[in-house]
Amino acid sequence: MAVTQDLLNTTVAEIYAQGGSLVLIGAGDTTAMQYLIDKKKVNKDAVGGTYFERPFAYRSPAKGGKITNGDEIVPLLNAQSTKKYQVQAQRHMIAVSIDGLELRRNDGKLGAVKLIKDKPMQAISQFHQDQEFWFLTGAYHDSGVSVIDSPGFDDCATLNGAITHTGGDRGWLQQLAPASQTGKVQSVAVDSTIRHINQFGAITSFATDGMLVIDNVYDTCQAFGGGTGPDLGFADGGTYSNIVVNNRDSVRITDTDKQIDGRNSASYQLYKSARIYNALVNLDPTNASFTGTPGFSTSSITGGILYFVNSKYVEVPYFDEVTRPPEFIRMIANQDVLTGHLFSDMNPMCLRLNSMGVISGGRIP
């Protein structure tokens, strides 16, 4: 019996109901970026039309003082925020088509599951990879199987602080000392006086000052993160290898959660409270997608990049997520094809920029 339209849609709905996400049937296709989204996503309505907005506060929400005699006056004024983060929700649509020939050559529920894995699941998996590639580099994933091409991600969040979005906003992390950083990030002008900057460090050579610079940037991020240090790191292959060599003499026993760490994702090294992922495919300086990418100078590309992200201060507001089940329908009456649509409508936000940082030069031995 061929796979019918009703059987296909019923099977998709059952898979989603059992696991809550179509990603679960695609073993090993979860990226580090998707882990961040799953951890920090919030289903909130946008304020201001198609924009997500959050208050920007750079002062303490309250003031106190020392009590010596018991009649001291404590200030009752609370700091007010006159600025706000603002990012535009980014909507993507993927059309997944299954032709009648494939429907007839697959049989029953097992055949429907096979088609779902081969079609919408592959599309979701590749979307996650395209999304992560942009988030890390501000470039497009030229893999030959990308589902989102230029300019699909142009106004989505990226760690590359040299990328300029529509309206003049930049990516999150600039490879410059705080005093030299310019432009706007999430509609708020970069300004060291209000601490709306990211941390930065430049390694001369890993053997000379590699871990010293990494320690300094991490500890500074932790100080501005209210005592919570970055928990995610993304490094190019050379920088990652140098960190592995540095940690080789350390013995660490870790109880891992198999649901989180047992997936087939990029390997990582533990550093303090951060997982530093080997983002070799994304941050490899020999990758053709880096050619002409603004903000990555020759010394930065050949010298390596390490990003520190504090997920405590990351929020992923969304309307739709791409893992929602599609409904397959016949779009054209005289065409033997069923088509389902996947939608993604979100944009990550950084709520405390000074708790995150970037380090260059880490791949230099």
Image (cartoon, rainbow, N blue to C red):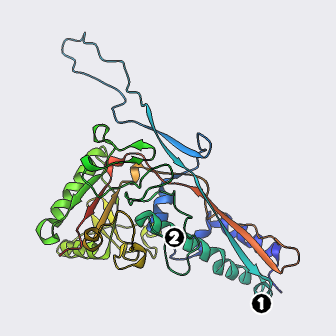
Q: Nearer the viewer, residue 74 or 197?
A: 197
Instruction: Specify the label residue 105 is tagged with.
Output: 1
Say above or below: 286 vs 16.
below
Q: Nearer the viewer, residue 313 or 156?
A: 156
Label 2 amino acid?
Answer: Asp
Quadrant containing the C terminus is bottom left
Instruction: Find residue 103 and report its horizontal and vertical position in percent.
Output: 78, 84
Quarter holding residue 120: bottom right
Quadrant containing the N terminus is bottom right
Q: Residue furthest right?
A: 334
Looking at the image, residue 326 sits to the left or right of residue 40; the answer is right
Residue that mark 2 sits on? 130
Q: Residue at x 35, y 26 (%)?
A: 62
Quarter holding residue 59: top left
Looking at the image, residue 19 sits to the left or right of residue 243; the answer is right
Label 1 amino acid?
Answer: Arg
Which SS class for mark 2?
Answer: helix
Q: Residue furthest left?
A: 208
Residue mark closest to the camera, 1 vs 2? 2
Q: Residue furthest bottom?
A: 105
Q: Residue at x 75, y 73 (%)?
A: 339
For the residues labelled 1 and 2, the Cα–Cα distance comes to 31 Å
Quarter holding residue 133: bottom left
Instruction: Find residue 131 and report its horizontal and vertical position in percent.
Output: 51, 66
Q: Nearer the viewer, residue 77 or 262?
A: 77
